[in-house]
Image (cartoon, grey):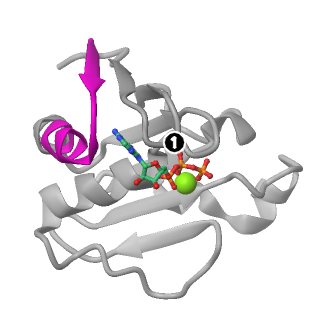
Amino acid sequence: METLVPDLPALDAFARVFARRLHPGSAVALYGGLGAGKTTLVRAVLRALHGSDSAVSSPTFVFRQRYDGDPPVEHLDLYRLDDPAELNELGLEDAFGADRITLVEWPERAPGLLPREAIEIEIAGSGEGPRTIVVSDPDPA
Ligand SMILES: Nc1ncnc2c1ncn2[C@@H]1O[C@H](COP(=O)(O)OP(=O)(O)OP(=O)(O)O)[C@@H](O)[C@H]1O
Ligand SMILES: [Mg+2]
């Protein structure tokens, strides 16, 4: 499924529709270059799931942010991960679980970390320009 997202309000609308596909246990892999809009989409999905006041980020671990709510949302950003061996020390495996939704930026930095059934999102575009978002779900329910 491919969606043209011309601006930020359209991104919010996309996020609200997309969030309806998510449920506890969902994992989402977010692909796209620097500045494509992965973090912006995560925040919009958080607002859709938890309400407008939820996406207040508290200073925590650089790779991992947890947002309490129903269900809890985990946001991983693996950009700074340059050695996959670091993964073991970080113990990110428990960021995934049947009780939570997990969204991952730069999943390609951690091959094998995400569950096989993760939904894949690819954002193309940059700057102030329009984005194209492709969603592929290997196991559409
Ligand atoms: N659909 C859109 N239309 C216009 N601007 C957008 C759109 N989506 C995102 N942006 C803007 O583009 C920038 C994207 O930044 P963002 O941090 O979300 O990218 P990112 O993919 O997370 O980058 P990084 O890989 O560095 O983490 C933000 O300034 C955001 O406002
Ligand atoms: Mg980002």
Q: Decide if residue 26 is on the left or right side of residue 59.
A: left
Neighbourhood count class around disc 1 (C-alpha, 10 Å): few under 14, some 14–19, many 20 upward: few
Residue 36 lies within the magenta run: no
User: What x and y, as percent, mark residue 6?
Assistant: 27, 31
Q: Determine if the magenta segment contains residue 6.
A: yes
Question: Residue at image x 48%, y 71%?
Answer: 65
Please tell me which residue lies in front, 80 or 116: 80
Q: Which amino acid does label 1 sit on?
A: Gly
Residue lying furthest bottom: 59
Instruction: Magenta stretch: give its range.
Output: 1-15
Q: Position of residue 120 (x, y in %)?
A: 43, 26
Helix, strand or loop at mark 1: loop
Say which residue label 1 marks: 127
- Give the answer, above or below, for where 66 lies relative to 136: below
Residue 117 position, x and y percent, is: 41, 26
Residue 107 point in image, percent of width and height: 61, 39
**With 96 as the anchor, is 42 left or right in this view?**
left
Question: How many numbered marks are there?
Answer: 1
Q: Does the residue labelled 1 lie within 8 Å of ligand 1?
A: yes
The quarter holding residue 3 reads top left
Figure check: 52 above or below 47: below
Quarter residue 111 falls in:
top right
